[in-house]
Amino acid sequence: MAIRSRDNPTRLLWRRFMLFGLVVFFIFGSWSVWGAWRKDVESAALNQQSQAALADLVQQQSQLQENIQDLQTERGKEAALRQEYGVGKAGEHEIVIVDPSQPVPATSSPTVFDTIKKALWRW
């Protein structure tokens, strides 16, 4: 009986090798796509963080520009000196503002019922 070309063991072996090669190629390809997707997600998160940091820096820059403009005037310099060193002009006196005292609420000793209630609520 003659061996048909489809049943040739060499041909079947090559088919299996090719199938195995395609499976390996598919696995590595999928792994590469997965890695690229993860890197894309990470870069999007880093981009969002850098955009937030940039917005903070822009806001700080505008605040510093306002402070510089304030310090370029005589009034701004005086306010900065007063705030930093606590100095005043000649003839100025310190004014101390005292809040009115508030009465202390009277507290009574806890009853037995309050003690039991506190013990039960801890559980």
Image (cartoon, helix red, strand yellow):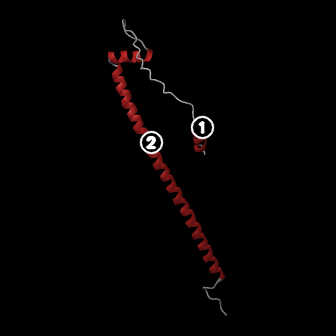
Q: Quadrant of residue 12?
A: bottom right
Per the model, the C-alpha gap separating discs 1 and 2 is: 59 Å
From what the image shows, is residue 17 above or below residue 40? Answer: below
- Label 1 packing within 10 angstroms: few (<14), some (14-19), many (20+): few
Residue 4 in the image: x percent, y percent? 62, 88
- Looking at the figure, which quarter contains the N terminus? bottom right
- Residue 112 is tagged as 1
Vertical placement of 81 versus 108: above or below? Answer: above
Amino acid at the residue labelled 2: Ser
Outermost residue to the top: 91
The secondary element bearing badge 1 is classed as helix
Q: Which residue is mark 2?
A: 50
Upstream in the sequence, badge 1 or badge 2? Answer: 2
> For this view, does 109 lie left or right of residue 72?
right
Residue appearing at x 57%, y 42% in the figure: 117
Q: Secondary structure at mark 2?
A: helix
Query: Which residue is rendered at x = 33% and y = 16% of the image?
Result: 75
Q: How many marks?
A: 2
Name the quadrant containing residue 23.
Answer: bottom right
Residue 81 placed where, x, y %? 40, 15
Q: Residue farthest to the bottom? A: 1
Is there a contact, CB below 8 Å, between mark 1 and mark 2? no
Q: Quadrant of residue 87?
A: top left
Q: Is residue 5 above or below residue 79?
A: below
- Left or right: residue 98 versus residue 6 is left
The one nearer the camera, 106 or 29, is 106
Q: In front: 89, or 29? A: 89
What residue type is disc 1 on?
Val
